Image: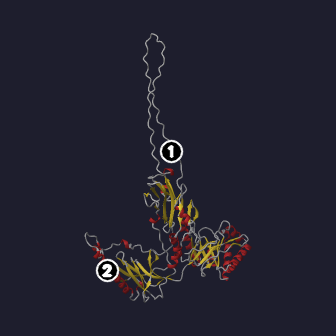
Amino acid sequence: MRRFPPRDQPPRDRPRRQDLPRPEGPFDRLLRARTQRDPAPFIIGGTVAFIALVILLVFVLSGVFGGDGDGGGGDATVGEAVGIETRYGEMPGLPPGLVALSEFVHFDTDGDVSATILLPLRSQPEDETGLGFYTYLEGRWQRVAEAGLTDDRRQAEADFTAVPENLAVLRVVAQAYQVAGSLPSGGSLHPDAKVDIVSPRDYKPQSDGSLGGTATDVEAGEEVLVMPTIVGSGEDTAAVVNDILADESLREQHIEEILRLADNGDFAGVDLEYSSVDPDLRSEFTAFVQELGRALREDEQRLSLALPPPGPQRDAYDWPQLGQGADIIKILPVADPVDYWETVPKALNQLVQDVDPRKVMLVVSPFSVELTDGNSRTLGYLEAMVLASEIKIREPEDPERIEPDTGVKVVAVNLAQSEGATSLRWSDDAAAISFSYGAPTKRTVYIENVFSVGFKLEQVQAYALGGLAVADASAQRDVANVWPAVNRFIETGTVALVRPNSDALVPRWEAPDGGKLDAAAGPSVIWRSEDPGTFMLRMLLSDGDLLFGREIEVEVKEKRPTGTPTPLVTFPPEEPTPTPTPTPTPTPTPEPTPTPTPTPDATPPGQVTGVTAGPTGDPGEVV
């Protein structure tokens, strides 16, 4: 179950505003439908009255908040306008990177009230850069509107279609968080990536203490620091790292090679991903980090470490000592998305007690994960959505039997309950979109996107960390674009915890070439055509962010003629052949026995056709 970072809780005894009774307004009776009554006068009158209300509200609030300005210390009522009351309140704690430019004001309204709000400012800012109206809701600050300045720069204003429960004008100060981006060797930054540090994964440790690899030519701004990553966490390199640490001479050689790399490449420092160090080499790794960090800082360069989160198990990482030796410590994610929320918040809570939080960066991954019997497999974003959108023809089983007016059942095989799967849905335990498929072995896929990353970023704010790192900041197609969530967090200093609309996750169907669908949405559909030919069916599927299409062709055969039954043919009975009789003895002649009429043969059954086994349909094509 997901464990949320600690934060202030909202009052529990405060009723929700939408639950409060709403008195009948002055125009409610007039706007009720009546027979044979021209509505134009009331519409015009209502519009004029609404404009007057907004003007009055702006005037009253300006007068209320433009007083002596000493109302920030309590909850005194400071004024009211038509349909709205205002009072000062105590300013909740602000996260790093935000400063208050106004008092904290509560609004009590009669339902949803539209208004232009002006709040007096404590100072006169030179411009509107970084200014915004924020509300404090459910224990966290959320930016709700851009703030404009009046001509005298003494007030900030914004239009609201529905006035929030509270407001304050806050400003984002100089960037409070650093952003690092990792790149595959030879990769390029995503065009939306706004990073302070870029780390191409170019190098690997060699058994003799040297480094193998070639530098990536990174195209980034001059202000971006380049700190290449030395990857020592793979199956082939983890053992090499342990061998180097265990041998003092190799350890010294390795330090010299790293310093030479940083100097020759004119890098701002280096990033070490040595996340699989043998716990028995704890002291050796600590000494290695302290010596390397000290040498890099002498040349005004930095040392970054990418390590697994601390936990109760024995590991190789002496966090207080590593915090002194390194300039940055990046905490890698946990593979299991559900276990993530049981592990990472606890780990960060422990880590910030041992290490300066400003040195800590939380790594967020843009990759999806598939879990099977406790084992995890990394999936690309596109790969996960292709898996979710696989479609097949299930009925009729034989393609030759698809004729005009035949119902053709097309199924999203990894989302339909009839296939032993589950629909695309939001998982509260993983804070991500998921679906399950496969029988008898169940596989569950968790899709990482802007929604799930937003929930992870909350920890950066909650634990006052130094920033975050994106595990793959490249422009590759199979990497989810999480930068809208990251950039908004950096620019506003707040996180947006948003879940996708459940209706947006339901598959939708189209028949662009014609025919009729029995439904527009759902994990399966029945389609039929009155005419023969080749038809395209398309399923559209969204993760709440992007829309994906999957297509499949249906071949409708010419309608086969109905077979005419063979007519029943009857034949006359055969005439018996007379047999010559010898001269009779004078004895009585017996009565002849009548010869029975022969029964005609039954009509043989017609030929059986159309019972051959055939394919169930092509899985579809990505468009």
Q: Mark 2 or mark 1, which is nearer the start of the sequence?
A: 2
Image side of residue 120 versus residue 237, left or right? left
| Position of residue 175 measured from the top left corner of the image (x, y, whole percent) | 54, 81
Residue 420 in view: no
The structure residue drawn at horizontal position 50% and vertical position 50%, both measured from the top left corner, is 400
Judge whether 619 appears above or below 53 on screen: above
**Between residues 461 and 611, which one lies in front from this camera angle?**
611
User: Does 44 sit above or below residue 511?
Assistant: below
**Residue lying farthest to the left in this orientation:** 36
Q: Is residue 258 left or right of residue 621?
A: right
Looking at the picture, tell me which residue is in the foreground, 119 or 225: 225
Residue nearer the viewer, 580 or 450: 580
Nearer to us of marks 1 and 2 is: 1
Provide residue 552's location: percent of width, then percent of height: 51, 58
Residue type pointed to by label 2:
Val
Percent of width and height locating residue 551 = 51, 60
Q: Where is residue 5 in the image (x, y as percent from the top left)?
A: 51, 72
Would residue 393 be visible to someone looking at this image?
Answer: yes
**What is the C-alpha distance between the residues marked 1 and 2?**
77 Å
| Crowd class of label 2 (few under 14; some 14 to 19; many from 20; radius 10 Å) | few
Residue on which disc 2 sits? 48
Give the number of the disc on residue 609: 1
Label ID, residue 419: none
What kind of element bears circle 2? helix
